[in-house]
Image: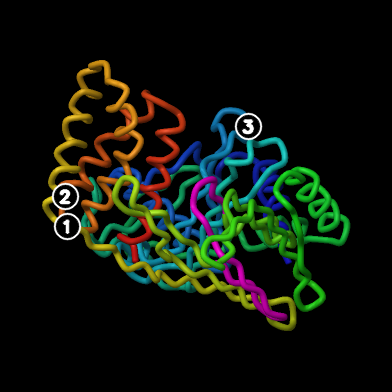
Amino acid sequence: MINKRLLIKNLLAHNDENSFYDKKRKLNISEKEGKAKLIKHICALANSNPKNNSYIVIGVEDEDNTIIGVDFFDDSKIQNLINAFITNPPIVTYENIPFPHLPSDKVVGLVSIRSLGNQICSLRKNIWKYYGGMVFFREGSISLPKNFDIKIEDINSKTVDAIENHSQNNLKLTLDSIFDFMNSKADYNPTYKVFKEYFVVCWASKEKKIENTIYHSRVDIELINEQVRLFYSTFDDVSISITEDSFKITEYIHLGLPNHHKFYPLEEVTITFKDSARYDIENKIVFQPPQFDRKTLYHLYNTNDILFEKLKKNIKLTEQEQQDLINLPATYLVCYFNGFQEAKNKLEEAKPYLKNYNKNLYTLYKENMRVLRKIRYN
């Protein structure tokens, strides 16, 4: 089993970006340009590596390989995005890899790409400045458009196999990681469980009981064997259920009108551990948007618009308006779920203003955008 943290270190140490791996400082697939560039690079890496895995490492400075990290990204539907825009799509996974020196809310993103063999990947339809039918290959560290009739060559298999073999997990790495997790999460009731006498899952959280149901907040869950962070959130609540062979996370979001919030299940993630050191992860969106009185929503929507205009014009807010501003991201989200289509655009437009206004408010904004992204991709 590959230790993904060790794999990232070995990829960065091997040499600069090349035809089997790329690195990025950050990723932004909420905008067309960022989405298009990611699809281009995945297409190029898949075509240039028909017999081996290829990788994109996210959260690394381009000049000196300094690991700076990115926000936890738990979009399990990234394969849906690839399938929608690429003909003969490769198998793509996105994993969050914690590093001890990074803040607890930062990870390194690892995109793993596995081609389906000798099938050429091409763009299925237009996106940004790229046209449907375009084919990309890697030339060194650059993804370039090429003709369909180019010969596919297997030139990286031995090199990638060697890197992956040097990234295998071992007992020392597992034990060190367990101790690191338990020590770093001492204030959040850390614990662990071993599945199939091989897999180790560690988790830490703050527990609270509401109407006979135990919820966990400030949750951090890691599959230690692979150094993969399975779940992380500072705000959302989850319930955890465990059997001898599975670990199930049900994520809830606290949603509603100001002073009238409820818990709504958002997504179920079930990890089933099997014999022969294998496991499956199943993600299932279970969210049913709550519906509210339209007249009340119009009032809240207009209040949000007034606050947003004041933010854009840098007008000082009253004490009450500052309190209302805390609810702005969640209120726009509720309005969008109730048919206010423009609310989504307002929410996206508000990003730089909320980011400049207050760090905690921007964190709330990112949590709401994460929920919106999951629902949209699903």
**Badge 2 vs badge 1, beta-carbon distance below 8 Å:** yes
> What's the amino acid at mark 3?
Thr
Q: Nearer the viewer, mark 3 or mark 1?
A: 1
Q: In whole angstroms, how far apart are the C-alphas of marks 2 and 3?
A: 49 Å
Q: What range is drawn magenta here?
A: 232-249
Asked if residue 241 is among those painted magenta in the image, a careful observer would answer yes
Q: Quadrant of residue 348?
A: top left
**Badge 2 vs badge 3, beta-carbon distance below 8 Å:** no
Q: Say whether residue 151 is visible.
A: no
**Left or right position of 368 against 6:** left
Q: In whole angstroms, how far apart are the C-alphas of marks 2 and 1?
A: 5 Å
As displayed, is residue 117 above or below residue 21?
A: below
Disc number for residue 125? none
Secondary structure, mark 1, is: loop
For label 1, the residue is 293
Residues 109 and 166: in front is 109
Residues 125 and 204: in front is 204
Residue at the (50%, 43%) spot, across then down: 141
Asked if residue 282 is among those painted magenta in the image, a careful observer would answer no
**Left or right position of 270 against 135:** right
Query: Which percent across, then down, holds residue 367?
Result: 42, 46
Secondary structure, mark 2, is: helix
| Magenta span dominant secondary structure | strand
For label 2, the residue is 296
Residue at the (59%, 63%) spot, across then down: 214
Query: Which percent across, then down, holds residue 248?
Result: 59, 71
Residues 365 and 150: in front is 365
Secondary structure, mark 3, is: loop
For label 3, the residue is 66
Name the N-terminal-most of marks 3 and 1.
Answer: 3
Quadrant of the rendering where the N terminus is positioned: bottom right
